[in-house]
Image: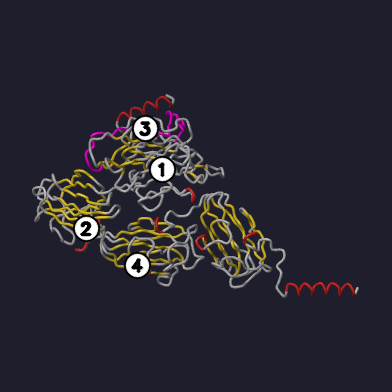
Amino acid sequence: MEKGIRSKLAVACGLMLLFGTTRIALGVPNDDCADAKAIGNVAGLSFDTTDATSDGPRHYMRSPNLWYCYTAPCTGCATVSLLGSDYDTKLAVYEGCECYPSLTNLIKVSDDFRGRQSQLSFPVTAGNQYLIEVGGYGSRTGQGVITVTCDKNAHPPDNDDCEGAESIENVTDLPFDTTCATLDGHGHCETSSNIWYRYAAAGSGDVTVSLVGSEYDTALAVYSGADCYPTSEDMIECNDDFDGHLDSQVTFQAVAGHEYLIEVGGYSVDESGPGVISIISDFEPPLDNDGCLNARKVGDVTNLPFDTREATFDGPGHCMDSPNLWYRYTASCTGPAVISLCGSGFDTMLAVYRGWECYPKSSDLIGCNDDACGRQSELTVNVVAGNRYLIEVGGYGDQTGQGVLSISCEGEQPAEQYDLGDAPDSTNNYGRLMSAYPYQGLLPVVVNANYPTVFDDGTGNGPHGPVHMRPKAVAYLGEMVTWETEADHGPDQDGVNNIRPSADSPDNDRQDDGVVFPVNLPSCRWATFDYVVQVVEPGTDLWVNVWCDWNRDGDWDDTPTCTRGPAPEWAVQNQLLFNLPAGVHQITTPAILPWHPKNGPDQMWMRITLSERPFKGGSHPGETGNGGSGPLSKYDIGETEDYTFAPDMTRPVCEDFNGDGLINTQDLVDITAAWLSTCPE
């Protein structure tokens, strides 16, 4: 027996001489990143870092760590939790499962959540992979449990990134939720999950931004300007705890017409959750475009009517001190632009300034003109495509009257200033499936998107999304249009492609503003809605078409049936607009018959297209995704806008019962006839 023991000791000593005193980790298969354990959703999966070693990029932790490669089973919000572990844990999540992940791949981290354990939530796309790093605070190790869930009904907020900051005015207790948000920005005030708002001051004075009433320990910052990302010099206020409470609140001095960024987050990396934001100011906004702060957005336009007879004067008085009106112009070209009041009915004056900030300084003044065409005014100024300019319109002395404004950009046009839609499209240049809805009724499946948005996916097969080659030349929807060269790649005026297939991110066009909300579309009841058309050059017949995904199946190809008849997803079919003068017009659609599933998403995708020719069946009739497509030769003018929204389904008191586009006594007659035909005598 002694000889056997001595032999075993000799072997052990030999191993120590061979390997030194280094501790050999045994039985930890996912100790190294390269050996990350593949998992999906798990509940209470045990782990032990006692015998683990430390490897990896050490972006967030230096303790012994373990690795998991998580494949998301849903599109929504995933939660990784180490609650129930018996030591002080740390947690990090990265995009993709490549080892070792770079700092740019880091999505989110957590240290102390509800005590000394870690938990975080982050946005995921079904089928995508995410690397999970589990470790401890300092050099701590121990036993623990990991739980991973995926909620298809939860999603990151639309204003998660600074570039997607939500425009906001004075509000009271507007709800928000940062649970599934991520961190972006330079961390001047906060390092937690954050969201962004863009606030334009309608006057000068005190503005109070408050998160009082939120359900977690918040942090709040306000920056001067609207450029992403703001610098430390841009920061006006930063607040954690207000008045002895965990809620945040700041008050700052706003300047009329100036824009501000508001960053909402939490006190630490672990702080996130639901909250409310309120903004209160001590000034009243002006009405119409009588004041610079409410300057009207305008593009290239011909003979846009205006009237200064009821206007008042405001502004710096660099060029005029008469009653005046204001316009915000974004240049469509680089080179000379002609701004003209020729054809107006009184002795006018005209000024053009750099930027949109109110009130402009004398150094912002580009030109001032009194008499150019008789007693009317005109200026030719050099502009840069995409840059912003203020236009001030008034009269000589104290004169007022009716007039017309024309703007013509005659310089070099940026290449391919097209307009396309921004609905999700699985026939894209990245070969990635995009989702239309996170679920369909009670079925835990993702609805793939087959809306024709991308014009050329590289295959030449189509269907082709609608392209408008000169969107602002004759007429367009709403107040503004931003150009792009293709829906999913290439240059884009507002800085982000309309759809981003790799991130399953649609609905990124910042100027979809033609449809007047709310939209009332009760199921199987005749309905109409309003939209806005801005006419630049009168004299062209215009056609409007609308598609609605009534059955929420990811395309606009179907025709559900109501008791009143068919409800085609091609809802508005070639509505003709003619003899519209220059300017803004609010149009009502013909009567349409909506249809909604009993069990399905409330959200619905809708497309509206304004063009110079009617829709004649699409680019690929009979194929999935043909509804809403555009011609291979492209549209010349107009605009396509896509919306995802939950329509109001309540039955209106005043209903177009017979679907003739009018609400009158004939509807009462038809209602009575229907009642008599179905009710017993």
Magenta extent: 556-584
Q: CA distance from mark 2 to mark 1?
A: 41 Å
Q: Which mark is residue 647?
A: 1
Residue 367, image x, y percentages: 17, 57
As drawn, is 209 to the left or to the right of 44?
left
Of labels 4 and 3, earlier in sequence is 4
Of labels 4 and 2, earlier in sequence is 4
* Position of 359 relative to 543 (above/below): below
Q: CA distance from mark 4 to mark 3?
A: 49 Å
As drawn, is 97 to the left or to the right of 5?
left
Give the colouring mode of the picture.
Answer: secondary structure
**What residue did someone put label 4 on?**
234
Q: Residue at x 56, y 42 (%)?
A: 443
Residue 285, image x, y percentages: 25, 57
| In the foreground, 647 or 340 | 340
Residue 573 image-quadrant placement: top left
As drawn, is 649 to the left or to the right of 346?
right
